[in-house]
């Protein structure tokens, strides 16, 4: 099913941007894992709109309702359904675009696939779908923490401005979620300039998982890095993934990028914590390229369903840069992928680590 991800930890999201609600069903969380609305809400609050002046001003509280699979604060081992109601959708903003294929959007592709589409905010193709991913990721993060695996992430590039430091404690201290306190203000300036120009900018989000034991993942078709690639590219607006040294390794020699294991650790981590498709005990490092937001206020040429062409200006409340809100989504997809890999390893070896 196109809305499901995972084999043993199965996450299925549902809902449209301007429908009554969005949500997720999680199947495969082991029994006895702490699950409370507060745990999930903490992560949803990081993803929700209206957090700052550099994100969309749509005001959604994103209050989670846990409908099943939980009793007295712990998981039962049965499917967990979570619902978040849409309360601030303004469908009238899209009335003029009902018969238009917006540039950069999935409108035309959706019509060709289904023969029908929800034009209000993109329907299923909207970033609002990621609410369910973040809720499922919150549960995965909690479970992984029980064995010492922690996940962090941040915006490390906006347009041509790049972070140098990786001080993850700084991420929640600035609205762009940059781990470099000195670079964050420059990133914000770029985003604010794009907003003022009724345009948008892209960037790069980096996620890191520490404490991942060696042995997770498979050596051929279900390589851990392949699963992470699929997970990250399933996030709306992502167009590229790097593991560890990534594309920069193309400029180096093998003598520089071969990670040497000495004592109980690797001296470098060009492999991004994965060797031969299997985790090697080093930090798992994943970077995601995030394209500029497609909904912009600048006049653009657009085709209509009847084959005509017109100039449109997209009204409504949109992000001039998606990166700050992609951070918790990317963290969640990393957690979901690792959770699935952990359960598969437990099934194979009969132990947690």
Image: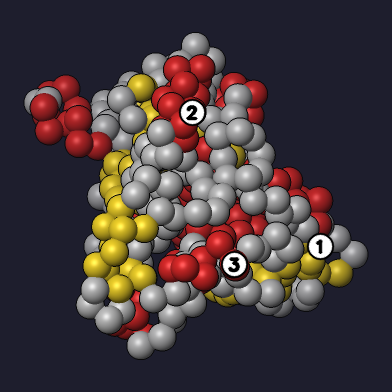
Instruction: State yes or no: discs 2 and 3 in contact (Cβ < 8 Å).
Output: no
Residue under the image location 63 percent in, 63 percent down:
90
Q: Which residue is mark 1?
A: 74
Quadrant (top left/top right/bottom left/bottom right) for the N terminus: bottom left
Query: Residue furthest toward the bottom?
Result: 115
Structural crowding at the residue carrying mark 3, measured as other residues with C-alpha within 10 Å and reported as few (<14), some (14–19) or many (≥20): few
Which comes sooner in the sequence, label 2 or label 1? 1
The picture quadrant where one finds residue 157 is top left
Residue under the image location 65 percent in, 58 percent down:
135
Gap between marks 2 and 3 measured at Cα: 26 Å
Instruction: State yes or no: discs 2 and 1 in contact (Cβ < 8 Å).
Output: no
Residue under the image location 31 percent in, 36 percent down:
244
Which comes sooner in the sequence, label 2 or label 3? 3
Residue 139 visible, this angle: no
Q: Which mark is residue 192?
A: 2
- Local secondary structure at mark 3: helix
Which comes sooner in the sequence, label 3 or label 1? 1
Residue 161 visible, this angle: yes
Q: Which mark is residue 92?
A: 3
Query: Residue 259 placed where, x, y %?
Result: 26, 29
Residue under the image location 78 percent in, 68 percent down:
66
Structural crowding at the residue carrying mark 1, measured as other residues with C-alpha within 10 Å and reported as few (<14), some (14–19) or many (≥20): some
- Local secondary structure at mark 1: strand
Image-based side of 321 in relation to 72, left or right: left
Q: Nearer the viewer, mark 3 or mark 1?
A: 3
Query: Residue 220 placed where, x, y %?
Result: 24, 62
Gap between marks 3 and 1 measured at Cα: 41 Å
Q: Nearer the viewer, residue 30 or 71?
A: 71
Query: Residue 51 placed where, x, y %?
Result: 66, 39
């Amino acid at each position: 099913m196109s809305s499901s991800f995972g084999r043993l930890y199965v996450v299925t999201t549902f809902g449209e941007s301007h429908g009554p609600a969005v949500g997720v069903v999680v199947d495969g969380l082991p029994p006895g894992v702490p699950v409370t609305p507060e745990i999930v809400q903490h992560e949803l609050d990081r993803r929700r709109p209206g957090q700052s002046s550099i994100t969309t001003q749509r005001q959604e509280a994103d209050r989670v309702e846990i409908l099943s699979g939980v009793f007295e604060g712990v998981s039962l081992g049965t499917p967990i359904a979570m619902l978040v109601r849409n309360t601030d959708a303004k469908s009238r903003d899209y009335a003029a675009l009902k018969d238009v294929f917006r540039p950069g959007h999935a409108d035309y592709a959706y019509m060709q696939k289904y023969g029908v589409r929800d034009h209000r905010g993109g329907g299923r193709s909207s970033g609002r779908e990621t609410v369910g991913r973040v809720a499922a990721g919150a549960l995965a993060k909690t479970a992984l923490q029980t064995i010492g695996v922690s996940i962090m992430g941040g915006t490390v590039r906006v347009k041509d401005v790049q972070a140098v430091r990786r001080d993850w404690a700084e991420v929640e201290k600035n609205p762009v979620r940059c781990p470099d306190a000195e670079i964050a203000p420059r990133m914000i300036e770029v985003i604010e300039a794009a907003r003022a120009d009724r345009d948008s900018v892209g960037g790069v989000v980096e996620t890191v998982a520490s404490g991942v034991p060696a042995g997770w993942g498979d050596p051929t078709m279900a390589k851990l890095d392949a699963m992470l690639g699929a997970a990250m590219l399933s996030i709306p607006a992502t167009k590229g993934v790097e593991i560890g040294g990534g594309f920069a390794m193309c400029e180096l020699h093998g003598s520089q990028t071969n990670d040497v294991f000495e004592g109980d650790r690797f001296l470098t981590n060009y492999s991004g914590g994965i060797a031969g498709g299997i985790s090697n005990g080093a930090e798992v490092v994943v970077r995601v390229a995030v394209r500029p937001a497609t909904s912009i206020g600048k006049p653009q040429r657009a085709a209509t369903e009847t084959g005509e062409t017109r100039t449109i200006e997209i009204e409504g409340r949109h992000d001039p840069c998606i990166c700050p809100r992609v951070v918790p989504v990317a963290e969640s997809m990393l957690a979901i992928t690792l959770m699935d890999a952990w359960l598969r390893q437990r099934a194979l070896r009969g132990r947690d680590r």
